[in-house]
Amino acid sequence: MTQEEIYESAPESELPIDDDNIEWAEDTSGISPLLLGLCYLSIAVCTVVEGLLLFDVMQGFEWLSVVVWLVVHCVLSVVGAFAITALSFQWYEGVKSSLFSFVLCTLLLVPFAGVAGVAGALLIGGYIAANRHQEEVYWQITRTTELPFTAPIGRDTAAIGRRSLVETVLYEPDEEKLYKKVLAAGNIRAALSVETLKAAVRHPVERIRLTAYQTLDRKVSRLNGEIQLLEKQANEQMGEEKSNTWLQIASNYWELLTLEKDEPIAREQLLKKASNAATQATLVMSTNRNAWFTLGRISLARGKAQQAEMAFIKALRLGMPAAKVSPFLAEAAFARRDFNQVYKIIKSINPAFRAYPPLSHLSEFWL
């Protein structure tokens, strides 16, 4: 299979930030002086007439009948809504035309608020909303492709410890600190905390050893309980919702695998169950790219490189970013001993992603 066949329908990368690529919206914030004057005059006239209508209501409809009063109120509401909407374009930029419907409904349903009251409320509310979040802008954009992420402006960058959590368990001299770190590891995903907890199981201090063992046991029980609940839900669901539920079941089996990977029999059983769940997700909805991607990773772990490659290519064609899929495609090609294909795939990865570990180490070896 050629590189062109693999990436024939892969999504194109995003355009670089460039002034030529930005479409500027047309400026519609201003209105003519004549229309501006008519708007203010309309609001003034509506306010006076609404005051007379309110007085008539207080007098028990002495001047106008109820029907005539309602007709005049509706006409004033329409005129006032047009005037307030037009002025809103003058007061604030980017006002949507749907504001007219909102103002008209407000004037019709809250007659005693009046055109002037609604206009004043919108003006004051808009001013407060526009000036409410006055805070420093932290994130900045870099035009350097090799450096896609930058540290936030104004944030203090503390020194990052070089020792991993596993090494902390092995070499931390303070027993109390180590105990708290083992407790904290219980709140971390199993895929990230299992090595730490297994290292703590071998610790000579009994409290730390038992805490780590109980934490591992709770993680296994929680994941098994979630799987049983999700399987019941999947039987009652349809379509995309059902496919995503089966995908979550496969993900839970994959996480269980990190806890049981030292047991060959349990590992094979979990991989088989995870593969069945991911396959079920693709059967329910064949366009679920995340399910295809997960099935590819599971197939790789089972040593089925050809099946994994087919699943990854399917995920690519459904819109999965090439930068995410390509490293696993390279791994599948390596398992098939197609080293020329490994070289082509790694070379096709965006240099911005190849600049960081672990891809940087891979690129240094292959390119």
Image (cartoon, rainbow, N blue to C red):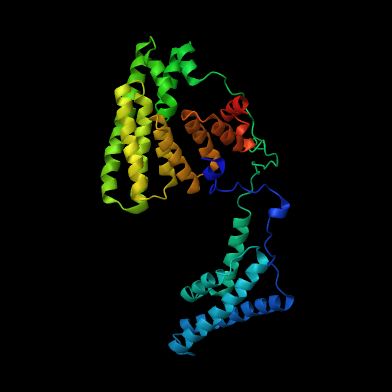
Residue 51 is at least partly visible in this image: no
- Across and down, in percent, residue 326 comes to 53, 37
**Residue drawn 42% across and 50% down?**
287
**Residue drawn 48% across and 20% down?**
165
Q: Relative to 104, is 350 above or below?
A: above
**Residue drawn 38% across and 31% down?**
255
**Residue drawn 43% across and 33% down?**
305
The answer to which quarter of the image holds residue 277 is top left
326 relative position to 137: left or right: left
The answer to which quarter of the image holds residue 355 is top right
Q: Relative to 187, is 86 above or below?
A: below
123 relative position to 69: left or right: right
239 relative position to 115: left or right: left
Quadrant into which the C terminus falls: top right
- Across and down, in percent, residue 112 comes to 50, 75
Total labels: the figure holds 0
- Across and down, in percent, residue 190 comes to 40, 28
Q: Relative to 133, is 125 above or below?
A: below
Residue 21 is at least partly visible in this image: yes
- Residue 248 or residue 304, whichever sits in front: 304
- Residue 199 or residue 293, whichever sits in front: 293
- Across and down, in percent, residue 123 comes to 61, 65
- Residue 34 or residue 198, whichever sits in front: 198
